[in-house]
Image (cartoon, rainbow, N blue to C red):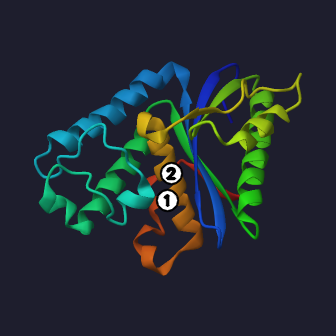
Amino acid sequence: MAERGNLRVFYVDDSGNARDVAALGWLEVDVRRWNAAMEDWRRFRTDLYEDEKTRIPVDYEFHAVKFIPGRGNPSLLESWNRQKRHRGPVALRALEVIAGMPGTRAGAVYRRTGDYAHDRIDLYRTWLRRLNDELRASDSYALVIVDGDGTEHAYRRVHRELAGAGRRVIEDSLFQPAGESHFLQCADLVAYTAYQSVVRHPGKRFMWDWFGSRLPLAQGPAAL
């Protein structure tokens, strides 16, 4: 639960597959520790760039569903890009940094889906209402920033469904492309890791325990 009287920012991204599960992951940041948390992440990204064994630019977008399986060319070193086995250790380091950033907490929820388009939005709705209840109980407020370009109007409608006097999630969902936000990229990694821990696809067996082992203080992944 959020600290009483505080303002928090939730960076949110989704993951999943229309055949099985819709998942939602987030990074919750205490605004008073935002700079310290960002400094930790930026230091990690700078280290990845300056390390002669990785050479991944700071502004390269971590998109877990592409990065971890080996798609794309994140490194300036072609030899590194050709070796898919290099991706997992970097993703694990990223999760460890996320777990240790001051003033933050990761979390995830999911839903078994029969109608992915509907269930994805309803999962967000259920999560948002639960968040609003927690914030009201602690007399706190939050902003929610979502990966996107602003064309997902369903998220805005969900925010406007919240009761007026008891509403603690302020504003509609604020959209930002993940490529322009380090913390949305963190949320993307959390969501994808949570998704793999739930669906346990045989081809991603190496990821099944990542969420629990690398994010030990995270919420979930909880079924909603």
Amino acid type at mark 1: Thr
Give x and y (percent) for residue 81. Answer: 21, 60
Quarter of the image with the N terminus is top right
- Circle 1 crowding by C-alpha within 10 Å: few under 14, some 14–19, many from 20: many
Amino acid type at mark 2: Val
- Total marks drawn? 2
Give x and y (percent) for residue 12. Answer: 58, 42
Q: Are marks 2 and 1 in contact (CB under 8 Å)?
A: yes
Q: Is residue 45 visible?
A: yes
Name the residue at 21% across, 51% down: 75
Looking at the image, residue 133 lies above or below residue 187: above
Give x and y (percent) for residue 195. Answer: 56, 62
Query: Mark 1: which secondary structure?
Result: helix
- 164 horizontally vs 212: left or right: right
Q: Which residue is mark 2?
A: 190
Q: Which residue is mark 1?
A: 193
Q: Nearer the viewer, residue 23 or 158?
A: 158
Q: Is residue 224 visible?
A: no
- 154 horizontally vs 146: left or right: right
Residue with the most extreme front position: 151
When asked about the image quadrant of residue 224, the answer is bottom right
